[in-house]
Image: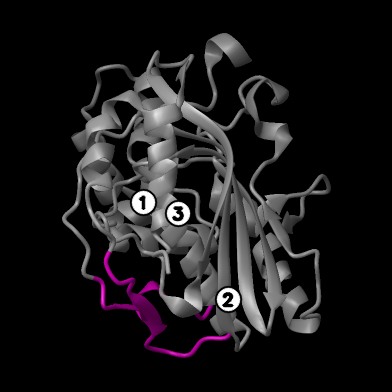
């Protein structure tokens, strides 16, 4: 049987060999893009943490907890030495205080100064805010994820347990001036479903950095399925990843070739060291990864592209 990871490697081949050249309007960076795909992983047969390069597991766990707990300030991540979100608030800071502080000094101050972090570490309208405290028109904070879990607890046959991060009120030129989200919401919607007694999760990702971002996204949402299954006293089933635009940045070409030359290894497994039955009683340190023996990491530069663009979307 084909190794489950081959599905992902096939997407790498598609963008490498058949990707259409496009240019990000904000940065001028070229991507090579395809549109529309789906991959599926049976979590009961192995946790889909890719093995053809080492994936930053600590970052996966802490970022997911950051989302699940409704946070939108990077201080939690910085305090835990996870720096995958540093560039975005720093970019906003630089627009207002150009040349005043290096990124390293900015992040050090986020970690050491709670007031500075409150003022400059916030990323409004990001995933955690949408998942756990979507602001309704009457001012209520709607807990989408909490509701979805309780809906499945009451009705395992429910078809309506969907969580969205795509709020047009804050997107691009649909937003009022000055209120647009500054980060591009990429993995914008997921749905939960119980099949054969197991918790399944399908993610729709409208835009996907296939080399750097997608391995992270696969692991993150598969882990979310495992956590929700544990809360509901069930086992995880399938993680289904559906793509809109998936693309390769031009400066990732050689790294992708290197990864494609590697053969997948056995997938690891995930378990939990403590019981928990709610989002609030879950802690990141409860997650235990076992049997992960990947190929070495392949480094590549993150391109801070996409999202709000002043020229296209107004001030």
User: What percent of the width, then of the height, locates residue 115?
Assistant: 37, 45
User: What percent of the width, then of the height, locates residue 14?
Assistant: 44, 36
Which numbered mark, 3 or 1, is in the foreground of this view? 3
Q: Please state, as top left, top right, bottom left or bottom right, where the C terminus lies in the image.
A: top right
Q: Alpha carbon of mark 3 to alpha carbon of mark 1: how far? A: 35 Å
Against 198, residue 72 (above or below) is above
Q: Alpha carbon of mark 2 to alpha carbon of mark 1: how far? A: 33 Å
Using residue 105 as the reference point, say whether residue 220 is left or right of it: right
Using residue 66 as the reference point, say whether residue 191 is left or right of it: right
- Please identify the quarter of the rendering in which residue 153 is found: bottom right
Going 63% across and 76% down the picture, which residue do you hit?
199
Going 45% across and 64% down the picture, which residue do you hit?
65
Which numbered mark, 3 or 2, is in the foreground of this view? 3
Residue at the limit of the structure toward the front, as seen here: 1
User: What percent of the width, then of the height, locates residue 139?
Assistant: 77, 49
Q: Is residue 74 magenta?
A: no
Label 1: element kind: helix
Q: Which residue is mark 2?
A: 237
Q: Alpha carbon of mark 3 to alpha carbon of mark 2: how far? A: 18 Å
- Please identify the quarter of the rendering in which residue 232 is found: bottom right
- Please identify the quarter of the rendering in which residue 197 is found: bottom right
Label 3: element kind: helix
Q: Which residue is mark 1?
A: 75
Q: Please state, as top left, top right, bottom left or bottom right, where the N terminus lies in the image.
A: bottom left
Q: Which residue is mark 3?
A: 7
Q: Give the dominant element type of the magenta stretch: helix, strand or loop.
A: loop
Q: Earlier in the sequence, mark 3 or mark 1?
A: 3
Label 2: element kind: strand
Q: Is residue 298 visible?
A: yes
Q: Earlier in the sequence, mark 3 or mark 2?
A: 3
* Magenta extent: 265-292
């Amino acid at each position: 049987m084909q190794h489950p990871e081959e599905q992902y490697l096939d997407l790498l081949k598609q963008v490498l060999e058949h990707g259409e050249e496009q240019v990000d309007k904000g940065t001028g960076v070229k991507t090579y893009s395809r549109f529309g795909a789906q991959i599926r992983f049976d979590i009961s047969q192995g946790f889909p943490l890719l093995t053809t390069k080492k994936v930053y597991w600590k970052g996966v766990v802490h970022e997911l907890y950051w989302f699940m707990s409704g946070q939108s300030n990077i201080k939690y991540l910085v305090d835990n030495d996870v720096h995958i979100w540093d560039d975005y608030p720093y970019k906003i800071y630089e627009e207002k205080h150009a040349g005043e502080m290096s990124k390293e000094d900015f992040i050090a101050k986020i970690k050491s100064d709670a007031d500075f972090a409150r003022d400059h570490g916030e990323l409004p309208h990001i995933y955690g805010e949408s998942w756990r405290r979507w602001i309704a028109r009457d001012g209520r904070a709607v807990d989408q994820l909490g509701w979805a879990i309780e809906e499945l607890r009451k009705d395992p046959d429910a078809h309506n347990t969907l969580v969205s991060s795509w709020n047009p009120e804050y997107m691009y030129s649909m937003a009022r001036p000055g209120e647009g989200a500054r980060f591009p919401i990429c993995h914008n919607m997921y749905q939960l479903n119980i099949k054969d007694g197991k918790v399944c999760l399908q993610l729709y990702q409208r835009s996907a950095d296939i080399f750097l971002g997608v391995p992270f996204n696969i692991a993150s949402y598969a882990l979310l399925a495992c956590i929700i299954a544990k809360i509901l006293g069930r086992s995880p089933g399938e993680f289904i990843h559906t793509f809109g635009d998936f693309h390769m940045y031009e400066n990732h070409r050689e790294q992708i070739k290197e990864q494609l030359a590697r053969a997948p290894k056995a997938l690891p497994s995930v378990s939990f060291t403590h019981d928990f039955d709610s989002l609030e009683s879950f802690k990141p340190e409860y997650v235990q990864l076992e049997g992960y023996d990947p190929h070495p990491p392949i480094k590549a530069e993150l391109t801070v592209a996409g999202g709000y663009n002043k020229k296209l979307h107004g001030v």
